[in-house]
Image (tube, rainbow, N blue to C red):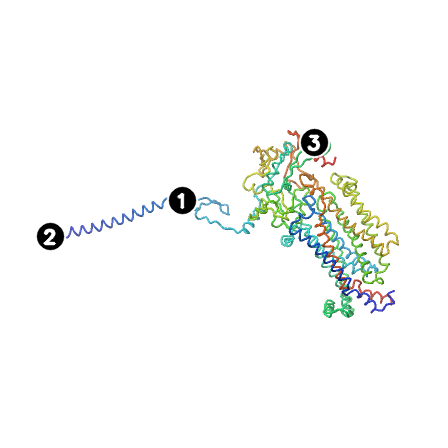
């Protein structure tokens, strides 16, 4: 009996142990499941993957938390911006078309430019001139930015390669390298350059900014500044400040390679060559051989009159 | 006259000015104080920026550039008198060679400083060597001016070797350390035939080599302007025009130095009326050539009257720059030519007065070349303050312009107090030859 009675006991002990084991495993499993469940949500966000473009131009997917922010010292950032500024935007050949028949001397372009590049009111990257060729011809307003010549006299004479021509057609100035000799100003037939004779307007506020060649900010005393076609905005796919600020549809800006220019006011796009061909487009002083990248459409059929008060100043040009 | 003097007397005469006289000390004190005042003006420019000048975004080159051209121009005289005239066997110029070389060295060395004072960031000067671009005429200018200063220094030094030996032997009233320096600098000169030949050969080689370098410095300087397309600068004759103009300024500068040294150092027997007469004729010759270039430079564009040129010419002939233009042309060029053709005008005093007018004319002529062109670019000057349209130099700017002039005079004064301004060795040799 004892033997017999032992058996069930034995059995029951085994069952008991078995049950405990089961429960233990169950608890472990359950706990693990719960733990896994709890972790599931947090893991889902932590392992979020994003697509990035490698330096070799290959699209890859990596976990977002694998991204490391590389801390650059201001000197490294400056070198990076200088190199980027010299490289320019590959495959582009920027052009500007200025329609003189639409310019009413609103000067929003000058204002926007001076704000974007931290200039004083008398400092012009772009200047709207009152022009008249002869006593019998009509006066007109002519916005005059840097012509971004393909054969720029300014870059040729620079002794230190501080001003240079980029592959995308833009002529820039590196004011961290400029020695302030002003030979480029003497060489430029379009008077497109300015010099910081005194402390620039925002030099106090801008003093901690890292210098960006493509914006030429912070401006620096004793160096040259000039129109940049807002190279910093072009990098973001936007239009230059003057172009988008114009209320009268004077400016078209675009890429010669694509043969497309877009009006800054109406956002309408046109075939660049056709626009020139249809409207008698020309460049300033082509006889100098500078090959400007800024084109003008003649002041034909002006919709708004030339203001009476500006006539005298315009007439000074032909000394009539 | 020199025939009657013994060698010792000649040596004594020609070294008598190598001493620290009272007059020298007073003059140096005056120069130093004036220099300090002018350098303070430069300090203000460094502190406050170039806003302290009258320059603006249109006239961005002004007095400083005119001054630079003047300095380079004046320095060319070393090449004309010491090299060209000696190669042409013009014996009369031999006693004047050292004066010309002293002027050349002083003005060429200071010219470099003039251009640095015009820079917005002079502390970045090294960029010209680190990032130098061979296309830029400024890089050419820096190169040739440096070479010219070095050659001029050699050209002054090598013929000086025998004289340095003489100084170390005959100057008894100077401190021993000074005599040691003379001995050291004379490089063991002992007057052997071998040494004489060596000096003759190296001086001959330098005389030839200095000619293209001197032509280069002023031609390149003229290209700073002629290589732009601006009205008044866009000229193919700027190189020779500047070089000939340089000879005019330099010859007049030598006349002034001759006069001053002759009076101050009692050199009447060595720099005679004959020398003044000869250099007066040289001044007429180079002035006539310069007049010829001036006629070309202004007549040709004035005949065509192309739009931008026409305005430039009108500004000079009848406009705002007419008084200055005609003053430089008449008082600084035409009248001197007419007067100097007359023999009495080539006596020391009249020649000195005429030369001072020539030098003033030469300086303002460079101002006339630089400034009016910048005031009239191709496109109208609008929407800027009035001081951007019309250039008028400020007092600080004038101070910064005068500083290099004082420096050049300082260098000349100091050199004239440590080396004989008339070559002793050559004077003795010349006399010995005549005796034979």
Callout 1: helix, strand or loop?
helix
The reply to whether the C-beta atoms of the residues labelled 3 and 2 are less than 8 Å apart is no
Horizontal placement of B52 versus B332: left or right? left
Query: Pointer 3: residues within 10 angstroms few (<14), some, or many (20+)?
Result: some
Q: Position of residue B228 (x, y in %)?
A: 70, 45
Disc nearer the start of the sequence (3/2)? 2
Say whether residue A268 is left or right of residue B362.
left
Helix, strand or loop under label 3 = loop
Q: Which mark is residue A150?
A: none
Q: Position of residue B48 (x, y in %)?
A: 65, 50
In space, the residues marked 3 and 1 are separated at their CA atoms by 68 Å
Quadrant containing the C terminus of chain A is top right
Q: Are marks 1 and 2 on the same chain?
A: yes
Q: CA–CA distance between discs 3 and 2?
A: 132 Å
**For residue A119, what is the image quadrant?**
top right
Q: Earlier in the sequence, mark 1 or mark 2?
A: 2
Query: Is residue B220 shown above or below B158?
Result: above
Q: Position of residue A18 (x, y in %)?
A: 22, 50
Q: Mark 3 = which residue?
A: A138
Label ID, residue A1: 2
| Number of marks in picture | 3
For disc 3, the chain is A
Tell me what residue is drawn at x 73 percent, y 51 percent: B67
Residues tagged by mark 3 and mark 1 found on one chain of the structure: yes
Q: Is residue A224 visible?
A: yes
Q: Is residue B425 visible?
A: no
Task: Find disc 1 in the rendering and name its residue.
Answer: A45
- Foreground mark, 3 or 2, reads 3
Q: Chain of mark 1?
A: A
Dot 2: chain letter? A
């Amino acid at each position: 009996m004892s033997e017999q009675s032992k058996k069930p006991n034995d059995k029951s002990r085994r069952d008991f142990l078995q049950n405990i084991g089961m429960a233990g495993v169950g608890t472990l499993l359950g706990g693990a499941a719960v733990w896994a469940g709890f972790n599931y949500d947090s893991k889902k966000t932590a392992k979020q993957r994003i697509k990035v473009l490698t330096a070799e131009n290959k699209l890859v997917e990596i976990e977002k938390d694998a991204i490391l922010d590389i801390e650059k010292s201001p000197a490294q950032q400056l070198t990076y911006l200088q190199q980027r500024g010299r490289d320019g935007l590959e495959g582009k050949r920027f052009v500007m078309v200025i329609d003189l028949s639409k310019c009413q001397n609103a000067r929003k372009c000058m204002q926007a430019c001076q704000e974007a590049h931290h200039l004083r009111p008398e400092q012009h990257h772009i200047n709207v001139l009152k022009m008249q060729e002869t006593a019998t011809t009509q006066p007109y307003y002519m916005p005059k930015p840097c012509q971004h010549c393909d054969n720029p006299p300014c870059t040729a004479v620079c002794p230190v390669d501080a001003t240079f021509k980029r592959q995308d057609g833009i002529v820039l100035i590196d004011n961290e390298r400029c020695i302030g000799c002003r030979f480029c100003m003497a060489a430029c037939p379009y008077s497109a350059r300015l010099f910081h004779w005194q402390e620039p307007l925002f030099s106090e506020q801008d003093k901690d900014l890292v210098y960006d060649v493509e914006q030429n900010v912070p401006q620096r005393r004793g160096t040259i500044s000039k129109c940049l076609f807002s190279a910093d905005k072009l990098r973001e796919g936007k239009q230059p400040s003057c172009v988008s600020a114009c209320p009268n549809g004077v400016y078209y800006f675009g890429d010669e390679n694509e043969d497309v220019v877009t009006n800054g006011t109406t956002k309408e796009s046109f075939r660049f060559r056709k626009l020139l061909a249809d409207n008698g487009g020309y460049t300033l002083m082509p006889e100098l051989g500078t090959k400007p990248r800024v084109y003008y459409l003649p002041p034909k059929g002006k919709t708004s009159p030339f203001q009476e008060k500006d006539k005298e100043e315009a007439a000074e040009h032909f000394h009539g | 006259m020199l025939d009657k003097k013994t060698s010792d007397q000649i040596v004594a005469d020609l070294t008598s000015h190598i001493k620290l006289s009272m007059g020298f000390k007073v003059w140096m004190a005056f120069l130093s104080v004036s220099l300090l005042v002018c350098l303070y003006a430069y300090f203000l420019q460094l502190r406050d920026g170039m806003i302290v000048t009258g320059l603006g975004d249109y006239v961005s080159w002004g007095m400083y550039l005119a001054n630079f051209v003047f300095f380079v121009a004046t320095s060319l005289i070393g090449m004309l008198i010491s090299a060209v005239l000696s190669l042409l066997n013009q014996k009369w110029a031999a006693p004047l060679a050292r004066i010309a070389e002293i002027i050349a060295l002083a003005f060429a060395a200071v010219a470099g400083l003039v251009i640095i004072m015009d820079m917005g960031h002079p502390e970045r000067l090294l960029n010209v060597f680190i990032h130098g671009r061979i296309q830029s005429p400024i890089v050419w200018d820096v190169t040739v001016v440096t070479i010219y200063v070095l050659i001029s220094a050699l050209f002054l030094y090598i013929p000086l070797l025998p004289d340095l030996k003489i100084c170390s032997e005959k100057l008894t009233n100077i401190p021993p350390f000074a005599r040691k320096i003379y001995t050291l600098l004379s490089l063991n000169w002992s007057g052997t035939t071998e040494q004489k030949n060596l000096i003759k050969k190296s001086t001959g080689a330098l005389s030839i080599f200095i000619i293209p370098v001197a032509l280069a410095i002023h031609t390149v300087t003229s290209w700073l302007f002629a290589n732009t397309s601006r009205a008044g600068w866009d000229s193919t004759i700027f190189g020779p025009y500047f070089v000939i103009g340089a000879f005019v300024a330099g010859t007049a500068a030598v006349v002034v130095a001759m006069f001053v040294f002759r009076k101050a150092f009692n050199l009447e027997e060595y720099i005679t009326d004959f020398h003044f007469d000869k250099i007066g004729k040289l001044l007429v010759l180079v002035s006539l050539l310069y007049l010829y270039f001036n006629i070309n430079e202004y007549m040709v564009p004035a005949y065509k009257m192309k739009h931008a040129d026409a305005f430039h010419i009108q500004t000079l002939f009848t406009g705002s720059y007419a008084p200055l233009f005609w003053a430089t042309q008449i008082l600084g060029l035409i009248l001197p030519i007419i007067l100097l053709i007359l023999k009495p005008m080539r006596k020391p005093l009249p020649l000195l007065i005429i030369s001072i007018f020539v030098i003033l004319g030469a300086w303002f002529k460079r101002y006339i070349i630089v400034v009016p062109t910048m005031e009239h670019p191709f496109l109208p000057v609008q929407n800027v303050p009035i001081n951007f349209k019309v250039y008028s130099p400020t007092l600080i700017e004038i101070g910064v312009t005068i500083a290099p002039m004082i420096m050049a005079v300082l260098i000349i004064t100091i050199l004239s107090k440590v080396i004989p301004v008339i070559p002793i060795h050559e004077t003795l040799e010349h006399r010995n030859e005549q005796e034979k």
